[in-house]
Amino acid sequence: MSQLYSKKIVGYAACCISALAVLTVLQMPKADAASMTFSATGTNPISGGNSAVLAAKAVFDDSIAGKLTLTLTNTGPGASAPSDVLTGIFWDYAGSALTSLTLSSAKAATVITNDKITGTNVNLTNVGGGKVEWGFAKTTASSGLGGESGVANPVTQHYGLGTAGFGISPGFGVGGTQQFNYGIITGYDSNANSKLLGDKAETFVKNSATFVFSGLPTGFDSTKIQNVRFQYGTGLDEPSTYYIAPPPPPKKVPEPSATVAFGLFALGALRVAKKKPLVLA
């Protein structure tokens, strides 16, 4: 085999391999987001403790087929009044309505009363004689979940969890003599009032609670969760904070692997183009 013939074969091979590399890169699957995190901060004009700061975080995770896990965390400072207690979360989903979504479990790793641990691994849907302290509600109504009549801040979202009733039914938790019972706090402010500390103090979830939903449809996309609202206190006229999406990131440049593949393709094609037609002796 002549040297010229060998070079031409190498050129054709380089071109084919380069094209295959490009196709491989372009067809490489992109992993779907298994979880989404939403955080929000705000101020509480009712409470005077800890500069009236409110902060919360929600992590939605759909890594288990057919299930959606929501970890709801109060990330603010210690509570000084009931309006500092995280008692609900509401959200929307930009895909098809999640009509089969149901709450299958709700757990708190730790609960506290008067700043002392009074329970661990607590089932929030069956506390103290079957009380439902946290409940779930959903609706397909265009107006959303609604809630207490006459309140200027109704729930426009279509899905929600709460330990206070908020005038939403069915499903929302209304257990306890005070509806912020088993709400979420990080701890107590040094100036916490008697509704939080004292002989009539309620029990609270410390830091976070985890909720698991079943009935998640195939094709669910966690990136379509939106309009997340964190609710505090026992009424919709009390403070709430919203997640505000950050500005979109700058446009991505081609990944190194794609750049290399295109470079090899171009180089192979250039080599073949420069060669004269193949003539066999």
Image (cartoon, rainbow, N blue to C red):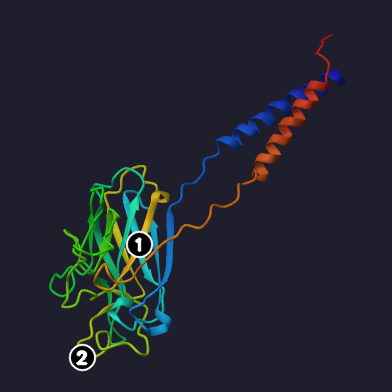
Describe the element under mark 1 as helix, strand or loop: strand
Residue 259 in sight in this render: yes
Q: Residue at x 52, y 43 (%)?
A: 30
In primary-sequence order, the first of circles 2 and 1 is 2
Describe the element under mark 2 as helix, strand or loop: loop
Q: Mark 2, residues whose alpha carbon is within 10 Å: few (<14), some, or many (≥20)?
A: few
Q: Residue at x 19, y 77 (%)?
A: 178
Q: Is residue 172 left or right of residue 258?
A: left
Residue 199's tag is: 2
Which amino acid does the dot numbered 1 rest on? Arg
Above or below, 96 against 235 in this view is above
Mark 1, residue position: 229
- Residue 266: image quadrant is top right
Above or below, 278 against 122 in this view is above
> Which residue is more in the foreground, 91 or 101?
91
- Give the image location of residue 84, x and y in percent: 33, 77
Q: Residue at x 33, y 53 (%)?
A: 92
- Residue 236: image quadrant is bottom left
Question: Label 2 to label 1, Cα distance in Å?
Answer: 32 Å
